[in-house]
Image (tube, rainbow, N blue to C red):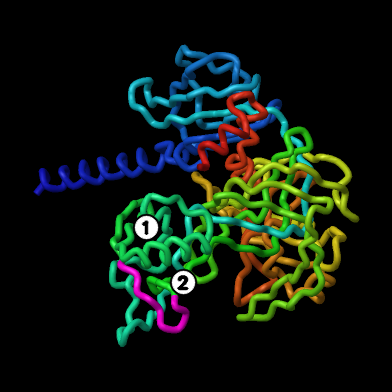
C-alpha cells in the first residue's frame, strides 16, 4: 500500500514537472518571430517571448542587427528570455538568425531584412483599368445549329468554362476576333482544329471539329469567349523616382468565371467619377466613372495578382486634394488598431480624406489581401456612398502619417466595414524593393510575371 502511495506521489510530481516545463517552454518564439521579418533602417522592435529559459543565438553575418544592444555575430551568444528582447537595425542587408535551446536543440530559424526607409506618394486617384488577357478566356457555351444538328463541338471536346485558349493550330492568340477568323477559315477547309488550353496550372490539347452555322453562314465551335476587361479602381501608391505604382489591393477576376485574368498587356488612365450607387446591407454599392484617355494619368499594367495590379506610370499630374509629398510606409508590426484615414474620390477627380477606424490587425506569417478590418466612421462618406463600394478598392490607408495599407473588400452585410491589405505585401509584389535595393530591376519583375 505504501509503495502504491509513493508511486502516485512520484507520478504526480513527474506530471507537475512536465506541466511546468511545458508552461515555461518558449512557445512564443514561433508566434512572435515569423520566418521572415522586415524592419526599417534605424528601427527598433520589442519582442516578448516571456520564458525563464535562455537560448543561444547566432547569425549568418555581422553588422546587420543587434539583440539587447549586443551585435548579432556568427559566433553563438547566450540571451535570457525573461525580459523582452530589443531587436535593433544596425545596417542594411539580410541575415539568417538561428535560435538553439541549451546551444543544442534548434528552436527557430528566421531571416531578418533591414530595409532603407521607403517614402511613397499615397494615391487616392480614381483610375480606369483596361486589361487584355494572355490568350482568350472561355466564359460560356452555346449550341450551333447545322444541318439539323444542334451541338457545341467545343463543349463535347471537353473545353470548359474558365479555360484559357492559348493557341489554335499553332497560332498564338491575341484577341477574340482572331479566334473567329481561324475557326471559320479552317472549317471551310474541312479541318479539325487543335486547341491548346490552360486549365489551372495544366496545359491540355483538345481536338475540335467546327460546324457550319445556319444562322450566320460561318463555321463555329459553340464558345463564348472574352479577351479583355475594364473597370474603375483606385491607385494606392506610386514612387516618383521609379514610376512604379500599385492599385486595387486585390486580384482582377473575370466577371463570369471568377478566374484571375492573366495579363498580356494593359493600361490605366484617369477616371472621372460621375455617380455612386449607395451601398446597403446585402447590396454592394459602386462607383461609376468615365475614362479620360491620355489625360494626367497614363501607365502600363504588367502584373495582376491577389495583392493588386502593378506597373509603371509614364505620366501623372497632381489631382485636386492629392498628397503633397511622399510619406514613410509602415511595416506590419507598426500598424495599430485605432483612428486612421483613407484617400478616395467620391465625385469628379477630387481626392478627399475620410476618417476610418482600424478595428483589428492580423499578425500574418504570409501575405494575404485581408490583413486588417476597417470601419468607415466619416459621416459624409457614409451619407454619400453608404460605406465601402466597388471602385474604392485600392484607396490608401494612412495612420500616424504613414502609409499602412489599402482598402480591398467590403462586408456585404455591413458596408461600413471591410478588409484592408498591408502596404508591405503590395510593395513586395510590385518589384519596388528589388529596384531600390539594387537586387533587380522592374524589367526583371516583368519577366517573372510573364
In the image shown, does 371 or 344 lie closer to the viewer?
Answer: 344
User: Which residue in the rendered view is the most extreme toward the bottom?
Assistant: 148
**In the displayed structure image, the side of residue 396 where residue 219 appears, left or right:** left
Q: Residues within 10 Å of mark 1 (few under 14, many from 20)?
A: some
Residue 60 on the magenta segment:
no
**In the displayed structure image, the side of residue 74 where residue 388 appears, left or right:** right
Q: Which labelled disc corresponds to residue 271?
A: none
Instruction: Give the structural element (helix, strand or loop) at label 2.
Output: strand
Q: Which residues are magenta?
A: 209-217
Q: Is residue 84 above or below residue 186?
A: above
Query: Residue 143's x, y, as percent?
Result: 38, 80
In the image shown, does 272 or 381 lie closer to the viewer?
Answer: 272
Instruction: Give the structural element (helix, strand or loop) at label 1.
Output: strand
List the residue tagged with mark 1.
199
Query: Residue 338's x, y, as percent?
Result: 72, 56
Query: Residue 402's x, y, as percent?
Result: 76, 44
Q: Residues within 10 Å of mark 2 (few under 14, many from 20)?
A: some
Q: Which image quadrant for residue 108?
A: top left
Label 1 to label 2, Cα distance in Å? Answer: 16 Å
Main secondary structure found in the magenta portion: loop
* Residue at left offset 44%, top offset 66%: 138
* Residue at left offset 59%, top offset 22%: 93
List the residue tagged with mark 2.
224
* Residue at left offset 30%, top offset 55%: 205
Q: Is residue 302 above or below residue 417?
A: above
In the image shown, does 284 or 367 lie closer to the viewer?
Answer: 284
Amino acid at each position: 500500500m505504501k509503495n502504491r502511495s509513493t508511486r502516485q506521489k512520484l507520478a504526480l510530481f513527474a506530471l507537475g514537472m512536465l506541466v511546468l516545463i511545458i508552461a515555461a517552454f518558449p512557445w512564443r518564439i514561433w508566434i512572435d518571430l515569423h520566418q521572415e521579418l522586415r524592419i526599417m533602417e534605424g528601427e527598433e522592435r520589442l519582442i516578448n517571448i516571456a520564458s525563464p529559459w535562455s537560448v543561444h543565438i547566432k547569425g549568418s553575418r555581422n553588422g546587420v542587427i543587434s539583440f539587447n544592444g549586443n551585435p548579432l555575430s556568427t559566433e553563438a551568444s547566450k540571451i535570457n528570455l525573461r525580459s523582452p528582447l530589443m531587436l535593433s537595425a544596425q545596417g542594411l542587408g539580410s541575415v539568417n538568425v538561428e535560435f538553439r535551446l541549451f546551444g543544442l536543440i534548434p528552436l527557430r530559424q528566421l531571416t531578418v531584412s533591414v530595409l532603407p526607409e521607403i517614402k511613397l506618394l499615397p494615391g487616392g486617384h480614381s483610375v480606369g483599368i483596361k486589361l487584355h488577357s494572355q490568350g482568350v478566356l472561355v466564359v460560356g457555351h452555346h449550341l450551333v445549329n447545322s444541318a439539323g444538328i444542334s451541338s457545341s463541338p467545343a463543349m463535347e471536346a471537353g473545353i470548359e468554362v474558365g479555360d484559357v485558349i492559348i493557341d489554335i493550330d499553332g497560332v498564338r492568340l491575341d484577341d477574340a476576333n482572331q479566334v473567329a477568323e481561324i475557326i471559320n477559315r479552317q472549317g471551310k477547309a474541312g479541318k479539325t482544329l487543335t486547341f491548346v488550353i490552360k486549365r489551372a496550372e495544366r496545359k491540355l490539347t483538345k481536338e475540335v471539329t467546327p460546324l457550319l452555322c445556319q444562322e450566320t453562314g460561318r463555321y463555329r465551335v459553340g464558345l463564348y469567349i472574352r479577351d479583355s476587361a475594364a473597370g474603375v479602381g483606385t491607385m494606392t501608391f506610386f514612387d516618383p523616382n521609379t514610376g512604379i505604382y500599385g492599385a486595387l489591393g486585390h486580384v482582377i477576376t473575370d466577371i463570369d468565371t471568377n478566374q484571375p485574368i492573366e495579363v498580356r498587356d494593359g493600361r490605366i488612365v484617369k477616371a472621372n467619377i460621375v455617380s455612386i450607387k449607395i451601398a446597403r446591407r446585402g447590396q454592394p454599392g459602386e462607383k461609376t466613372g468615365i475614362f479620360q484617355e491620355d489625360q494626367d494619368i497614363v501607365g502600363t499594367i504588367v502584373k495582376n495578382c491577389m495583392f493588386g495590379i502593378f506597373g509603371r506610370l509614364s505620366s501623372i499630374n497632381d489631382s485636386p486634394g492629392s498628397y503633397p509629398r511622399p510619406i514613410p510606409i509602415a511595416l506590419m508590426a507598426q500598424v495599430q488598431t485605432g483612428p486612421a484615414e483613407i484617400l478616395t474620390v467620391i465625385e469628379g477627380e477630387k481626392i478627399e480624406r475620410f476618417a476610418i477606424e482600424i478595428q483589428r490587425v492580423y499578425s500574418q506569417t504570409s501575405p494575404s489581401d485581408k490583413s486588417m478590418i476597417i470601419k468607415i466612421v466619416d459621416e459624409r462618406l457614409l451619407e454619400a456612398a453608404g460605406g465601402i463600394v466597388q471602385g474604392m478598392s485600392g484607396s490608401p490607408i494612412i495612420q500616424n502619417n504613414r502609409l499602412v495599407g489599402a482598402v480591398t473588400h467590403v462586408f456585404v452585410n455591413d458596408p461600413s466595414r471591410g478588409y484592408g491589405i498591408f502596404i508591405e505585401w503590395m510593395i513586395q509584389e510590385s518589384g519596388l524593393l528589388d529596384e531600390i535595393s539594387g537586387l533587380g530591376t522592374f524589367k526583371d519583375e516583368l519577366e517573372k510575371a510573364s
